[in-house]
Image (cartoon, helix red, strand yellow):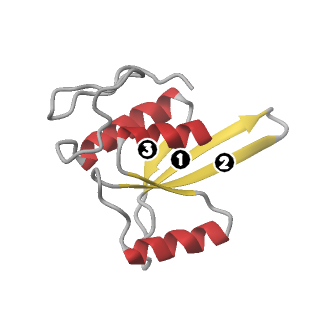
Amino acid sequence: MMRVGQIPKCGCGKTKDPNGGCDGSHSKVTESDIKDYFLKQARAFGWLARKVTWENVNNAPDWVLMKAVGTRALTARTTVWCELKRPGKAATPAQRIEHELMRRYGQPVFVLDSYAAVNEMFDKL
C-alpha cells in the first residue's frame, strides 16, 4: 500500500523510506509523533479518526477509526480501535485484558508504538 507523504523526521534526524532509515522505534520519537503520523495516514486512506474517552471503563483503547465502504443502498461499516504508545512501550497488563475482551466481541484492536506499526495496521485494513 502506498504511503502518503514522507514519514516525519525524528530526533535522530533520519526519516524512514522504503529503503531504510528511522522507523520511529526508538526513544527520540514521542507518542505525539506517532499520533500525528497515524492521523495523517488515516485521512489519506479514507478513515475517520476520533480520540475517545471512556466513562467508567479503564484501559480501553484511546482512538477509534471508522470507514463506510460500499454503495449507498448497502454499506458495510468498519470500526477499528487503536491504542497509541510511545516507541517501545507495550500495553499494560490491564489494557491487554480489556483489548482481549473487545476482540472476543469482534472488535479489532491494534497497539501502535512506531511508524512501522501504523503502516502494518493500514496494510491489514
Q: Which of marks 2 and 1 is nearer the N terminus?
A: 1
The dot on residue 65 is 1
Nearer mark to the viewer, of 2 and 3: 3
State which quarter of the image contains the N terminus: top right
State which quarter of the image contains the C terminus: top right
Residue identified by numbered label 3: 117
Q: Where is residue 73 in the image (x, y as percent from the top left)?
A: 85, 37
Residue identified by numbered label 2: 78
Label 2 residue SS: strand
Tell me the CA gap for discs 2 and 1. Answer: 8 Å
Check disc 3 and give the amino acid type: Ala
User: Cβ–Cβ below 8 Å for labels 2 and 1?
Assistant: yes
In this orientation, does residue 55 appear? no
Q: Position of residue 62 (x, y in %)?
A: 41, 59
Check disc 1 and give the amino acid type: Leu
Q: Where is residue 116 in the image (x, y as percent from the top left)?
A: 41, 39
Tell me the CA gap for discs 2 and 3. Answer: 20 Å
Q: Considering depth in this image, is 52 or 119 the residue closer to the camera?
A: 119
Nearer mark to the viewer, of 3 and 1: 3
Check disc 2 and give the amino acid type: Thr
Count residues near mark 3 (Cα–Cα under 10 Å), then give few for <14, some for 14-19, many for 20+. many
In this orientation, does residue 72 appear? yes
Which residue is located at x 22 percent, y 42 percent? Answer: 29
- Of all residues, the one furthest to the front in this rendering is 19
